[in-house]
């Protein structure tokens, strides 16, 4: 879909700043003081205070007078996307079909900046993984969904990604050097799928394929997660790639 041309004069700066401020809260920063939020956002402390007090007034945040934190009401913003967006609704039946046929957990991720956000997950799941919760954000360099997106970037975009992202070993198995990841991306490009073995979470192995539209543009990634102890990577490919490729073909005409 072609995006309209948006001029700076049409933008509401206050809304942009308020939304940016809400996105500062994270697992790393569950609570923020005004000075902390000002430092992270680049806004003045007085502006940050007014934004945060507005969020408190409207029920999106709470405060003890010194620190601020988001409330459950903030979930309504993300849930509005899940409830109203066309893409998750189109993907849901196929995701559930793959989950039933494989008896494994299946999810769909899309790129948001340098992260992957899961927008659909199958109702069936025998795994307890932090990376497959709806709305969960995971890094691109050490996840199957993320590497599928990285493999689709052109050389300049990929160079820029590595220049701005810190590569950290999240588990003993994480490939955390640029050379290792570039080698994996070349392999993904040649094979057409990605397999990540315990690099984001110990004990979890993930197999994924890209979801492209009829013009070949990458729209999402379809991944299947299982316990690493259940089978080898080779067995996982042999058993589950046919179902993932079938879903990929079914979804291409409607993306």
Image (tube, grey):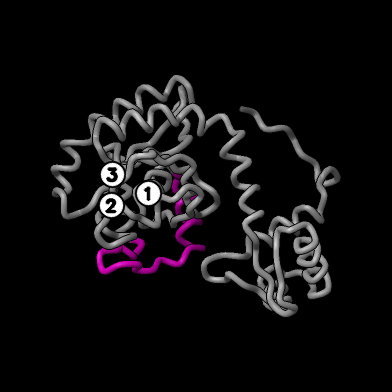
| Of callouts 1 and 3, the N-terminal one | 1
Badge 2, how many Cα within 10 Å: few under 14, some, many 20+? many
Please tell me whether residue 228 belongs to the stretch shown in magenta.
no
| Of callouts 1 and 2, the N-terminal one | 1
| Of callouts 3 and 2, the N-terminal one | 2
Which numbered marker is on residue 242?
A: none
Front residue of 176/226: it is: 226
Percent across and percent down for residue 165 are 48, 63
The residue pinned by badge 1 equals 147
Percent across and percent down for residue 218 are 46, 35
> Is residue 183 found left or right of 228 in the rendered image?
right
Percent across and percent down for residue 191 are 25, 38
**Which element carries disc 2, helix, strand or loop?**
strand
At 59% from the left and 36% from the top, the residue drawn is 83
- Between the residue at mark 3 and the residue at mark 2, the CA separation in whole angstroms equals 7 Å
**Which element carries disc 3, helix, strand or loop?**
strand
> Is residue 24 found left or right of 126 in the rendered image?
right
Which numbered marker is on residue 196?
A: 2
Please tell me whether residue 172 belongs to the stretch shown in magenta.
yes
Front residue of 211/59: it is: 59
Which callout, 1 or 2, points to the residue nearer the camera? 2
Q: Looking at the image, can residue 156 be seen? A: no
Magenta range: 153-178
At 41% from the left and 27% from the top, the residue drawn is 93
Q: Looking at the image, can residue 10 be seen? A: yes
**Which element carries disc 1, helix, strand or loop?**
helix
The residue pinned by badge 3 equals 207
Percent across and percent down for residue 4 are 72, 32
- Between the residue at mark 1 and the residue at mark 3, the CA separation in whole angstroms equals 11 Å
Decide: is 140 above or below 50. above
Decide: is 184 above or below 174. above
């Amino acid at each position: 879909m072609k995006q309209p041309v948006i001029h700076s004069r049409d933008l509401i700066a206050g809304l942009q700043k308020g939304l940016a401020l809400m996105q500062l809260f994270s697992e790393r920063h569950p609570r923020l003081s005004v000075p902390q939020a000002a430092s992270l956002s680049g806004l003045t402390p007085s502006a940050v205070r007014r934004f945060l007090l507005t969020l408190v007034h409207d029920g999106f945040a709470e405060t003890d007078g010194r620190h601020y934190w988001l409330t459950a009401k903030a979930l309504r913003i993300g849930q509005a996307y899940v409830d109203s967006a066309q893409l998750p609704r189109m993907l849901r039946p196929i995701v559930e079909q793959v989950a039933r046929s494989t008896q494994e957990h299946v999810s769909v991720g899309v790129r948001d900046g340098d992260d992957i956000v899961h927008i659909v997950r199958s109702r069936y799941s025998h795994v307890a993984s932090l990376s497959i919760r709806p709305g969960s954000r995971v890094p691109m360099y050490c996840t199957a969904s993320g590497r599928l997106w990285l493999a689709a970037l052109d050389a300049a975009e990929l160079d820029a990604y590595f220049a701005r992202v810190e590569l950290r070993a999240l588990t003993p198995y994480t490939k955390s050097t640029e050379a290792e990841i570039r080698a994996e991306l070349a392999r993904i490009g040649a094979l057409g799928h990605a397999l990540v073995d315990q690099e984001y979470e110990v004990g979890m192995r993930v197999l994924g394929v890209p979801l492209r539209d009829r013009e070949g543009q990458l729209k999402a990634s379809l991944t299947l997660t299982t316990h690493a102890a259940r089978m080898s990577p080779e067995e996982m490919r042999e058993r589950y790639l046919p179902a993932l490729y079938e879903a990929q073909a079914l979804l291409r005409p409607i993306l």
